Image (cartoon, rainbow, N blue to C red):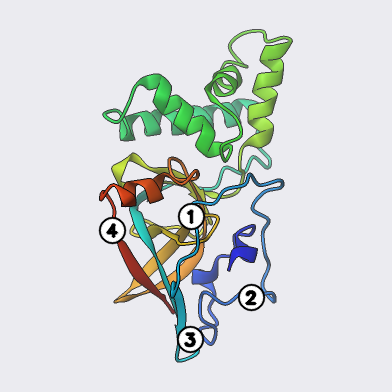
Amino acid sequence: MSDIFYFFPDAALDPNEAFPSWVTRWDLEIYPFTKDLPNWFVGGAPVENGAEITDNRILSLKGIKICVVKSTTLGLCTQEKTLVQDVAIISSLLDFFHQHCSSSGTKGAIQEAFARTLTLGRVGVVDLLEFLSIERRHLEGDNIERARNFYLNICFSKGLFFADDYYMGVGPKAVEPGDVVCIIYGHEMPYVLRQTGAQYKYVGACYLTGVMNGEAIEKFKAGKLTEEWFQLQ
């Protein structure tokens, strides 16, 4: 499945139930995740006997459950909207993020996490603040460049979500409250899964702030997270 980490097919919304959700559907429209992905490897090294297929339909993968999606927003697509509207949208999202994470860190740390999430780790809080101030004061030189860098790096038309334990992420537009975010051993990015009874459907890969550099593996080693098998149908 690592080859499809670069795409966001809304697999769980496919009406053709003849195919398992984890099977790559090249006949469906596929949306590029982003260009020039960093060298993420959230799942650490592969493990022995970490995957198996049963009945030619159920793919069992071993990994770690990170969080549960609590709320989502619409995609951040800016088509047919003005810069002023885009600034207002990002400002309102930041306010919502502040409310969601007010007890998890300082204002600066929250803003940094927000900026990193929207840009998939590429752009930090200074660029975000320059972008938000672009309509309120005259920007020149480095300030313009920072604002532009943030704007060009926002992950548009994807699903922004907030999860328990103050996690924030960007994933497929199909992501819904109640979906589970996990990492699978040996894989580059986290997965969004949708539970159906004792099994799951694959929704897509995601960016989750706070786990992209192997932090979840370290928490598991420290006894703060537990591993489990995820049966994908």
At label 3, which amino acid type do we have? Arg
Q: Secondary structure at mark 2?
A: loop
Looking at the image, tell me whether mark 2 or mark 1 is earlier in sequence order: 2
* Front: mark 3 or 1: 1
Identify the residue under disc 2.
25
Position above or below: 192 against 156: below
Q: What whole-number distance in Å separates the C-alpha atoms at marks 3 and 1?
A: 26 Å
Tag shown at residue 226: 4
Q: Position of residue 9 (x, y in %)?
A: 60, 65
The reply to whether the C-beta atoms of the residues labelled 2 and 1 are less than 8 Å apart is no
Mark 3 nearby-residue class (10 Å; few <14, some 14–19, many ≥20):
some
Of all residues shown, which one is farthest toward the front? 48
State the separation of the CA atoms marked 2 and 3: 14 Å
- Residue plotted at (36% across, 48% down): 71
Say which quarter of the image contains residue 200. Answer: bottom left
Classify mark 1: helix, strand or loop.
loop
Sooner in the amino-acid sequence: mark 4 or mark 2:
2
The residue labelled by disc 1 is 44
Amino acid bearing label 2 = Arg
Q: What residue is disc 3 on?
A: 57
Q: Which amino acid type is marked by label 4?
A: Thr
Q: Nearer the viewer, mark 2 or mark 3?
A: 3
Asked whether 81 or 111 is in front, the reply is 111
